[in-house]
Image (cartoon, rainbow, N blue to C red):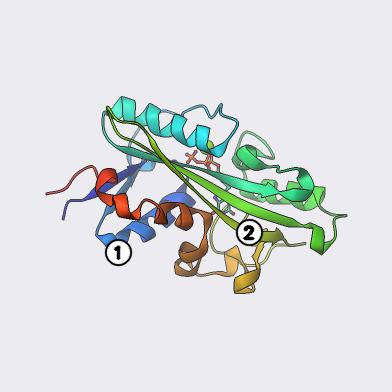
Amino acid sequence: MGKQVIIATKNKGKAKEFVSMFSPYGIEVKTLLDIPNAPDVEETGTTFKENAILKAETISGEMNTIVIADDSGLAIDALEGRPGVYSARYAGEEKNDEANMDKVLMELKDIPGEDRTARFHCALAVAVPGEETITVEGTCDGHILFERQGTNGFGYDPIFFVKEQGKSMAELSSSEKNKISHRAKALQQLKDRIDTIIVKGE
Ligand SMILES: O=c1[nH]c(=O)c2ncn([C@@H]3O[C@H](COP(=O)(O)OP(=O)(O)OP(=O)(O)O)[C@@H](O)[C@H]3O)c2[nH]1
Ligand SMILES: [Mg+2]
């Protein structure tokens, strides 16, 4: 009882997935959505890992507690890895998932199915006051569809097809996505260090 993790995200889709993934451990998830006036950390890194460290260390420094951050995104081979670290803001500063998907579909409109390979990346950073930051990463392979399929998830999920499941990421239930996703694979690597990432426990 009383176990918590703090995740430095303002993304509702990520927050929901972390709540589901931590609930079997009886760990409550707090995010920046629960903290009024939480600062926006500028994501100036060139890699997912750098940005995850930046977010975790900044918020951990301000709160003086253990903080986890997630930096993630979609890398499309035919676009030389774009949208990459710019996934959230690919079509503009306002972070619009629909506009982002439209932009990707437009850019890939002449690319045939076999050349539409892509992968999701997730870097997690755990900043512990006075200790070295821990990082882990996970990926999930797939390809980009020609149109949206499914309504679950967030971000680019409706246009990302996962071959093993024979479904788009947005057609998977949340429990299915949370078994195979880039985020789940990254988090899996923190499982044996779960005591390191908990902030409160009694
Ligand atoms: O279809 C998707 N399924 C996923 O599972 C997923 N994970 C990440 N993404 C995309 O990558 C951006 C992250 O950018 P990001 O790590 O900077 O997060 P963000 O700015 O949205 O929130 P924050 O955590 O920084 O507060 C997101 O907005 C999405 O566009 C995903 N898309
Ligand atoms: Mg961000």
Q: Residue 14: horizontal and vertical position, in percent?
A: 46, 50
| In-front residue for pair 87/127 | 127
Does residue 38 appear anywhere in the picture?
Answer: no
Q: Residue 197: horizontal and vertical position, in percent?
A: 29, 44
Would you place residue 159 above or below residue 133 in this image?
A: below
Does residue 145 appear anywhere in the picture?
Answer: yes
SS under mark 1: helix
Q: Residue 129: horizontal and vertical position, in percent?
A: 28, 29
**Residue under the image location 67 percent in, 39 percent down:** 90
To which residue does mark 1 refer? 24
Q: How far apart are labels 1 and 2 at the CA level?
A: 26 Å
**Residue under the image location 24 percent in, 59 percent down:** 26
Q: Which dot marks residue 115?
A: none
| In-front residue for pair 116/157 | 116
The disc, 1 or 2, on the residue closer to the chain's N-terminal end is 1
Residues under numbered marks 1 and 2 in contact, where contact means CB atoms less than 8 Å apart: no
Q: Quick one: which residue is furthest to the bottom in this view? A: 166
To which residue does mark 2 refer? 141
Q: Which mark is in front, 1 or 2?
A: 2
Q: Is residue 76 left or right of residue 93?
A: right
Badge 1 crowding class, 10 Å Cα cut-off, few under 14, some 14 to 19, many 20 or more, is few
Q: Is residue 80 left or right of residue 177?
A: right
Q: Looking at the picture, which amino acid does disc 1 mark?
A: Pro
Looking at mark 2, is its residue's CB closer than 8 Å to ligand 1?
no
Q: Looking at the picture, which amino acid does disc 2 mark?
A: Asp
